[in-house]
Amino acid sequence: MATIEQSNSHNLHEAIFEKLRTLLVEGKIAPGSKLNERELAESLHVSRTPIREAIRRLAAEGLVELIANRGAIAVQLSLEDVMHTFDVIADLEGFSGELAAKNISDATLSELEALQYEMMASYARRDLSSYYKLNLRIHHLINQAANNPVLSKLFSQVNARIEALRFRSNQDGVKWEKAVEEHQEMLDALKARDSSRMRQIMIQHVKNKRDVVAQLLNAEINRETAKHE
């Protein structure tokens, strides 16, 4: 793992949190794996204090489970949990998209266009890590543009559970291309202030992600089953 630059205490703690979050989302810390404070501290060349704080924050976000006698474990959802979570997120994103189309300011729309441009550049380079971070910023910005704090809080809490799976859903080239097209459709609907169209696009976008993830997880389950036959 890359060493974290140590500047002031706040920046260090934030950098450690973001680093561990990225490792979890990108699957470099696999679901079900234990987050060993000592090993992480050694690999990142920091003390265990910022590691411990980051793990607590990740647990609050839902990316890590704190289990008695086992410690911190990267969250591992069942297929049923995943499908239920995606269904909830589809409705939350649909509602936020509908409200955003009604409430979005010209300044926020310009910011979204700039992020879309950056995201397309990452897609052209096939830089999935950069692409996903920009993608997440776009989804959060649309959610914020809805101007409903309760909705924003719910979205952040529920979405954290499946971020790693949303990241993986773009590893299929054809599905990734489809997701990119859907993002352009979102931007077009927002520019047109078409709330019903935006709601439809957002719901379908998430359901497409759900279907890709279901295929991935079912394939993994089948492989594990075949190993033990």
Image (cartoon, rainbow, N blue to C red):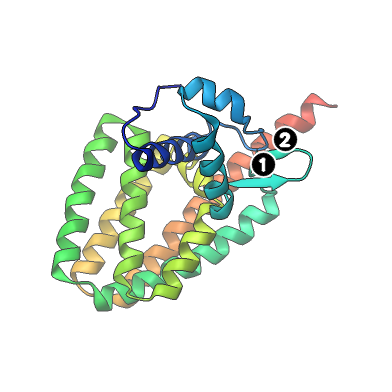
**Residue 38, relative to residue 76: is it above or below?**
above
**Quadrant location, the C terminus:** top right
Count how many numbered circles sit on residues in the image.
2
Please tell me whether mark 2 sits on a helix, a strand or a loop.
helix
Helix, strand or loop status at disc 1:
helix
Of the pair 89 and 209, the residue shown nearer to us: 89
> In the rendered image, which residue does mark 2 sit on?
222
- In the rendered image, which residue does mark 1 sit on? 218
Q: Residue 102's spot in the image, x, y percent?
A: 26, 78
Amino acid type shown at disc 1: Asn
In the image, residue 188 sits, relative to residue 210, either above or below, namely below
Instruction: Judge the density around disc 2: few (<14), some (14-19), many (≥20) Cα neighbours within 10 Å.
Output: few
Between the residue at mark 1 and the residue at mark 2, the CA separation in whole angstroms equals: 6 Å
Q: Is residue 201 above or below residue 217?
A: below
- Residue drawn 37% across the image and 50% down it: 136
Q: Can residue 166 be seen in this view?
A: yes
Q: Position of residue 121 (x, y in %)?
A: 21, 38
Residue at 24 percent of width and 61 percent of height: 187
Tell me the kind of residue under disc 2.
Asn
Residue 37 appears in which quarter of the rendering?
top right
Disc 1 packing (10 Å; few <14; some 14–19; many ≥20):
few
Occupied quadrant, residue 111: bottom left
Which mark is on residue 49?
Answer: none
Q: Is residue 138 left or right of residue 156?
A: left
Q: Are marks 1 and 2 in contact (CB under 8 Å)?
A: yes
Q: Left or right: where does residue 132 sit relative to residue 66?
A: left
| Percent of width and height locating residue 196 | 34, 77
Residue 132 spot, x, y in % from top left: 37, 42
Q: Is residue 194 visible?
A: no
